Amino acid sequence: MGYETTMMKQYEKELKSHSKELIKTQRALVAAQEELLNIQRQLLEKREVEITAVQSTAQQEIKSFASVLEKKCASALAPKKIQSAIVAASEDRGCNIIIHGLEESAEIEIETQIKSLFTELEEAPKMKSVERLGKQSSSARPVKVVLRSRDAQMSILSKKSLLKENDKFGKVFISPDRTVEERRERKQLVIELKEKAKQSPGTHYIIRGKRVLEAPRDS
């Protein structure tokens, strides 16, 4: 019995010692976890500061870019550049003609109609493309013809008045391919011509360039 009592006490002593060590370990673990959480909080705070700094920098760069873009746009829209753009657009249309009043037919190809029209004017220009403009409606849509040279365009335009007496194409009218601004100016000139013709019925007027001029009637 004495030996068993001694061993029991020894086990109790070791158990208490292990319990104390376990408690110390648990406390150390809790402390380590708290330290880890503290480090994580610090990292999050640091990351928020960095994100804020990046956002601030990005906003400044966007403002700077917007300012530069605004200046460039203002420069690009300067009167001289606008005029240059208008001239360039006009030059791009220099080989084009617009044909009004040409009947739309499902039976006859538009290219065939155009060639027949040119034949009446004793012209046979080479064409790059032919297309109807706008959406289909009850009236014939204008036709844009892109020619291969400006000389061909000028030659056809110089003969367009011959169509007035033509039995087949008497209702067809040919004009240059004008820009929106040019069409607006042309409309005003036509109004001016009609007003002058109304005031002086015996006088013949024509539009030459950007002016309405008095011209002799054909004998």
Image: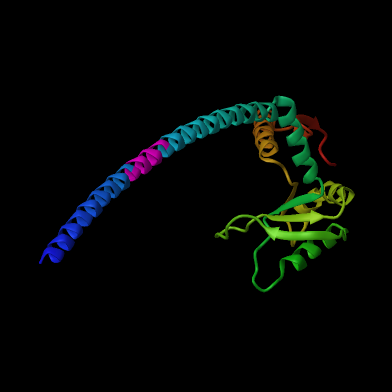
Measured as percent of width and height from the top left, residue 113 is found at 75, 65
Indicate yes or no whether the magenta region holds residue 46: no
Up the image or down, 151 lies above or below 216; here it is: below
User: Which residue: 82% across, 60% down?
Assistant: 127
Up the image or down, 117 lies above or below 106; here it is: above
For the C terminus, give its image quadrant: top right
Indicate yes or no whether the magenta region holds residue 36: yes
Measured as percent of width and height from the top left, residue 157 is found at 82, 48
Measured as percent of width and height from the top left, residue 92 is found at 78, 45
Of residues 201 and 174, the one nearer the viewer is 174
Of residues 204 and 144, the one nearer the viewer is 144
Up the image or down, 98 lies above or below 197; here it is: below
Q: Is residue 205 visible?
A: no
Residue 216 occupies quadrant: top right
SS assignment for the magenta stretch, majority:
helix
Residue 11 occupies quadrant: bottom left
Direction from residue 7 to residue 154 in the image, left or right: right
Measured as percent of width and height from the top left, residue 86 is found at 73, 35
Residues shaded magenta: 32-42
Of residues 93 and 62, the one nearer the viewer is 62
Q: Is residue 20 visible?
A: yes
Direction from residue 26 to residue 203 in the image, left or right: right
Residue 82 occupies quadrant: top right
Direction from residue 126 to residue 140 in the image, left or right: left
User: Which residue: 79% across, 34% down?
Assistant: 208
User: Which residue: 72% across, 70% down?
Assistant: 109
Q: How many marks?
A: 0
Q: Residue furthest front?
A: 2
